[in-house]
Image: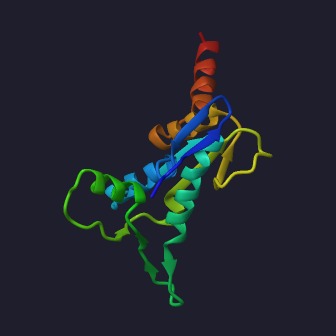
Amino acid sequence: MISYPKVLVGKMNLEVRPVAINKGEIVKRLIYNNPHAEFVFCAGDDKTDEDMFRALGGVAASHSQSASGASTPARMDPPLSASLMMTKSNQSGTLTPIDLSIHPAAIFSTSVGASTKKTLAVWHVTTPQEILNSMLLLANGTSDDQVDATETASQSHL
């Protein structure tokens, strides 16, 4: 079977890649190899990031709740890229579907750019700085804006 490359025109790039290798396949492989992950955050500002957002949407959709409200874990089939790598390296063994620990509310796909841009991402910010501020809030409980305001206030008292 011949697999022709896929050509994607991005914002400031031209990406030529095998059909089965893209950011979505990489994200799926990372999640498959880390089934106990509790938080996933991916952000992008380009068409080439849509595969990643699509993959994360599929992971979130595989999680279900029964009528009684009981939660069943997300189930993930082996990513195509992992299967291809096993075949190429002639490893024996079989990749099997796995249960994931992550809850859909802990998966954040974030598009960066104009709010009118069509995207598969669930979240949206207009600038990369908003991503940094959010990460700082998660890590430290403060953002650059809050740090800048505190520094300005303390400098005005000098």
The residue drawn where x is 41% and y is 60% is: 79
Q: Locate residue 80, reporting x and y percent.
A: 41, 59
Q: Locate residue 1, reporting x and y percent.
A: 45, 58
Please state if 84 lies on the left or on the right of 158 as rendered.
Answer: left
Q: Is residue 96 visible?
A: yes
Please state if 49 lies on the left or on the right of 81 as rendered.
Answer: right
The residue drawn where x is 69% and y is 51% is: 119
Q: In the displayed structure, would residue 21 be above or below residue 95?
A: above
Which residue ends up furthest to the top in the rendered image?
A: 158
Which residue ends up furthest to the right in the rendered image?
A: 116
Q: How is the image coloured?
A: rainbow
Please state if 91 lies on the left or on the right of 54 as rendered.
Answer: left
In terms of depth relative to the viewer, which is nearer, 100 or 156? 100
The quadrant the C terminus occupies is top right
Q: Locate residue 62, reporting x and y percent.
A: 50, 72
In terms of depth relative to the viewer, which is nearer, 153 or 67? 67
Q: Locate residue 140, reporting x and y percent.
A: 46, 38
Quarter occupied by residue 57 = bottom right
